[in-house]
Amino acid sequence: MSDVVACTAVHPLPDGEVRLLGAIESVTGAMTRVDIGGQKLLVDCGIGQGREARSWVFPDAAKGVDAVLLTHGHLDHIGSLPQLLDGGFDKPILATTATLDIARISLEDSLAMQRASFREIQWFLETFDKLAHPIPYDRSSGPTGALNLNVTFREAGHILGSASVDIVSDKSRVILSGDLGRPGSPILKDAFTHWGNARDVDVVVMESTYGSREHEHGHDDIEEKLLSVVKETAAKKGKIFIPAFAIGRTQVLLYFLNELVESGRLQRVPVALDTPMGLLVTETYAKFRQLYDAETIHKLSRGDDPLDFDDLYVSKKGRDSARIRSAPGPMIIIAGSGMITGGRIINHLVDGGLADPRNTLLFVGHQSVGTPGRRIQEAAKSGASVWLDGEEVPVRARIETLRGLSAHADRKELKAWLSAIPRVKRVALHHGEASAQRDLVAYLEGKALPSSSSHQH
């Protein structure tokens, strides 16, 4: 059995060390420095979010590295890149092509939300484009000749372009999981599991978001729950509001809705995609269809685009969003953001959506403490009101949660991924609450733990 370590920052290598700079005892802020073979790498450059944002400080140890490797384009893995570049970083940024595209979209949106000036945003995008070096999946590369190392990106199955990273020097080997998706999830291939055993693996850095739990619901359950909510709300001529994360969750929702429409189980209920960033990411998904799983590619070969269907409408401009708000139900409206911290979903809810008992607000992800989404969930229990955009809004709509849509592997799925890697000496857990990491250590060591369903992330 490998040595499995929780909540620990530093892990030695024969020719260096792995040092966790973020997500050491928390889910967000992933950032890991790997000193190996005389080179200094930064794997991910994330930022703290939610409660973790209050104590987030950009670490000095992230500066002065020879390259940045990105596992995927979620902000908790890339959100500190503007700060790094602003500090003068001018070395390669390595990732899959899809990750670089999504990271660019996400960071441009994030800077705009922070009210960066047009000039500041343009400077960042131009600098990012100069430093970005796409690395294909499964192709070992000493990036741009700058590093005397083999770096290989492997499918992680989390979102489009997501990767685990295999780094090999003359004396050491490190595998970093990135965020791992659930096996059998729609659209994307499963995480890579055919690791070679020619070399010992000195350290595996593995995420542990759901180290305490197993997902309660499978994909068939998700589809049936979604259909049930839509039918019951449509019967009342109400609207179904879905605050969805633009990257990954929106595309999976479209996949499930396409399944329901194409099978004839859902008819004549318009679906409005009212999220500019979600639309951009969905277009990026379409650009990288070669990364889809076999089932999705088979659908495409039959002329069935899994992210497009009859009665799907996209809203690109603010006036389009206003028309959707004034249109009568039944209707499904997918709008950002996932925890109702911003975006067009707020306008829909303030403008009568949350106060109308015919409507349903359907959450498809975990609502962190302190977010408007969590406050709505709590207010719904007592019929209270919430403050949104400076207005007091009564919570009269039905509040539901679509469980099982998590883009993260649970503890059983994490164990299966880890078990596929031969000759592992040490496992460093990160990207999980301290309790989840400790529980996962016990689970991996074969100690009995109660089976538990999971909240979303």
Image (cartoon, grey):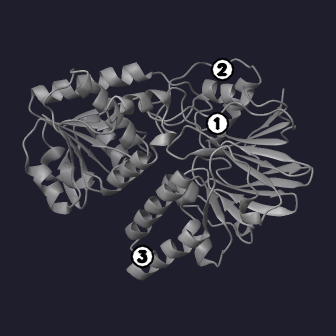
Helix, strand or loop for disc 2:
loop
What amino acid type is highlighted by mark number 3?
Answer: Ala
Number of callouts in the render?
3
Residue beneath label 1, please? 435
Q: Residue at x 36, y 43 (%)?
A: 250
Q: Quadrant of residue 416?
A: top right
- Residue 227 placement (x, y as % from top left): 26, 24
Q: Amino acid at mark 2?
A: Leu
Q: Residues within 10 Å of mark 3 (few under 14, many from 20)?
A: few
Image x and y of residue 14, in percent: 92, 50
Residue drawn at 68 percent across, 66 percent down? 59
Q: Residue at x 19, y 61 (%)?
A: 318
In the rendering, which numbered label is found on residue 116?
3
Q: Residue at x 42, y 82 (%)?
A: 119
The mark that comes first in sequence, 3 or 2, is 3
Q: Give the alpha-carbon distance from disc 1 to disc 3, as whole Å.
A: 37 Å
Q: Left of 64 or right of it: where is 302? A: left
Q: Nearer the viewer, residue 230 or 263?
A: 263
> Which residue lies most toward the bottom here?
119
The label number, if any, that marks residue 257 in the structure image: none
**Residue at numbered disc 2:** 449
- The answer to whether 120 appears left or right of 135 in the picture is left
Count neighbours of disc 1 (C-alpha within 10 A) and say few if under 14, some if 14 to 19, many if 20 or more: some
> Which amino acid, mark 1?
Ser
In depth, the one of 41 and 427 nearer the eye is: 41
